[in-house]
Structure formats: structure tokens, C-alpha cells
Amino acid sequence: MNTTHPTRSRAQRVLLALCAALPLWAAAQAPEPVKLGVIGPFSGPSSDFGTPMLQGIQLAVDEINAVGGYLGRPLELVVRDDQGTPDVGLKASQELVAAGVLGTVGFCNTGVALKSIDVFQNAKVPLIVPCSTGTPVTSKYPMAESYIFRNSARDSIQAPFVVADLVKRGWTKVAVFADTTGYGEAGLQDVQAALAAHKLQAVNVTRFPLGVTDLREELKVARDAGANVVFSYTVGPENAAIALGRRDIGWKVPQVGAWPLSFPFFIDVAKDAGEGALMAQTFIAEPSNERRAAFLSAYTRKWGKKLVVPMAAAQGYDAVYLFTYALLGIRDGKLSGPAMKTALENIQRVYYGVVATYEHPFSDKDKDAITANMLVMGKVQAGGVTFAYPEDARRNLIVQRKK
């Protein structure tokens, strides 16, 4: 007889099996919640991707608690808003550690993350980063000692992925527009390294502060330098300022970049000027297989609205499941930061996630779960993001594993 519960996801069924396999004594423990910290920009200019990240996290916690959490102990979120501001993020991180969280999921802005990760590292509280992509976030500490994990695509794989696509298309005269935040600085270095690997260099580099609204003069300089593509590295409406500036000066060249080109601040503000922009993606909100269809359906049921910045929501969701799969690997019930770090580095069961199939996603030598084979090229089309290539849509039927 088939006893599979028809409304439970595959991940939920695995969690039930893991709980059933744990020692009987564990079930008798008092149902004290397991505290999981969450930090991100839930207000301010970066909330357009911070809020979807939080919603994905909350959806996963609801599902996990519905099947018993950790041995009957529910996951309890302790949420802090970093407002996309480094000093606010630092204070919020200190508050999370003081609150006694076992681990934390969060950070969208690289500059905010880099200001705060010492707090988690020094307190030996594992941090899983589902959004921030700056390469230095997971490279600051020696791998064996690091408590900083990530399940978003770091820029050192996004930049080469996009540059390889440019070379394939013949767009080799690249103008780079990067903001002056930690994100823009690290991204610029990754783009320049990716170009150098193809024996290329940018024909023009422009730096600008957050908040700039008019880049037309800078774009004219890039045009006059002979650029045939603009590679932008910023997270907010500044991406739209680049697109609108190109339109205003009549410069019809493509705009490409990392995943922020899929954010509402770009798509909704740039409108027609952003049409056709290309960016690296780990997840595009199309129900290409059962897992992704189930996630999209569950999100809509819970939040009752269109999913914006699908990558942020999906990666936040997967991060919580990765935390829980690791948690269930602690078989003696002695929960601590060091025990969680070891458990994350040695997740035994495969987690069939939304973004990827996570088989040994982390180790004491590698703290990044996402590899280049998981990326696809997205394209802005009709106010949304779809696959740039039909073959990527077909390949997306199979959820990739780490290479």
C-alpha cells in the first residue's frame, strides 16, 4: 500500500524519515524552539530582494514545522532588518548572536555582509548566505575554520559565465559600469579577471556612487571609446539609470550583468529601455519540473501575489532546508555552533532543492554550494525574466548537481 502523503513535498518526506531514524530518547526532549536568525534588507532600497528572501525563508520554516521541526522542536525565526546599511547590519548581527541563535540565514548586500561576518565567525555561529554574491564573503577565512557558508552564486562564477556569453555573441568591446560599494568593487575585479582570461580588457570603466540618477555623460564616454556592450555591476535603480541613459543618448547596445538586472528596481523603472537585458540566474520562475512547480504554487498560496526576484526567494527557501538537513545530522541532541558547522560540512542526505540538487553542498574545503553548471542566462522580456536560450529552458528540466 502506498502511504506517501499526497500533499507533502519530497523534502518534507525526507525530514520525516530522518526524524524517525533518530534515537528514541530524542523525541522525549522538551519542545524548546530552535532559534534561527534571519538578517537582510527588509526596508530601504534593497528590500526589493530582501523581502522575497525572507518570504522564501518563512515558507520553508512553515513546511518544516508542519512535519515536526527538529525532533518536535519548532524552528523559531529571530528576524533583524539591516536596511542595506553596513553599520545597521553590524548592530543587528550582534543582536542575533546575543539572542542565542543556533545559526543565521541572511545578507543580500555584500558591503553589509563584509561588515558583519566577523561577528558570526568570532561567535562560532554558522551563517548561510542565500543572496549576497560578492566573492570575498566566503573567502575571508581559511576554509577549514570558516563558519560562513553560501548557497548563492558568487560573482567569481557569475562574471566568467556572462563574459563567456559575450565572447560567444561577439560583444568583446566591454564598458563596465560598477558602483563604489563593496559589491561593485568585488564585481569589477571579477569582471576584469574574466575578461583577462579571454585576453580582453574593458575599453572603458566607470565608477559611481549609489543614488546616482543620471549617467548620460559617462555613457557617452563609453560609447566614444568604442564599446559594443555595457556590463553593469550595481544592485538598485542605478541599473535602470544606465538603461535609461543609453536610451536618451540613442546608444543601442546591449546591457548585461549579474543577477540584479532581474530586480524590480531595474525592470519596473527602466521599462522598455531594459528590454532584452541579459543576466546570470540560478532560478527562473517557470514550473519546469515538479519541485519548482510545487515551490511556486506554495509561494502563491502563502503570499497571494506574484513572486518578484525569484532567485532570492528560492535560495532563501533552500538555505533553511540545508540548515535543517544538517541539524538532523546532529544525532546526540547537543546543539552548538561548532556542531552545526561540522554538520553543514557533512550533510549526508541529498536535499532535492528548488535551485539545485544538493549532494554534499559544503565541506571543510568548500563553503559555496553553487557551481557554474547551475547557472543559466536570463533575459528581460515583457516585464519579467525568462530564459535567454531555448536550450537552457530544456536543460532546466533537470536540476543540476554540484561539480
Image (cartoon, rainbow, N blue to C red):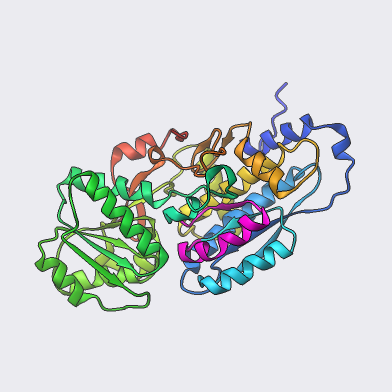
Percent coordinates x, y for residue 381 in the rendering:
30, 56
* Residue that protrudes farthest toward the top in the picture: 1
Q: Is residue 240 left or right of residue 304?
A: left
Is residue 255 rendered magenta in the image? no
Residue shown at the point (29%, 62%) measured from the top left: 232
Q: Closest to the observer: 325 or 157?
A: 157
Percent coordinates x, y for residue 278 in the rendering:
29, 54
Above/below status of 73 relative to 402: below
Percent coordinates x, y for residue 224 in the rendering:
9, 68
| Quadrant occupied by the C terminus | top left
Q: Is residue 8 visible?
A: no
Q: Is residue 231 left or right of residue 107?
A: left
Residue shown at the point (60%, 39%) measured from the top left: 345
Percent coordinates x, y for residue 227 in the rendering:
14, 60
Residue shown at the point (67%, 47%) measured from the top left: 63
**The image quarter in which residue 390 lies:** top left
| Quadrant occupied by the N terminus | top right
Above/below status of 251 relative to 189: below
Residue stretch rendered in magenta on the structure? 108-133
Q: Is residue 371 left or right of residue 300?
A: left
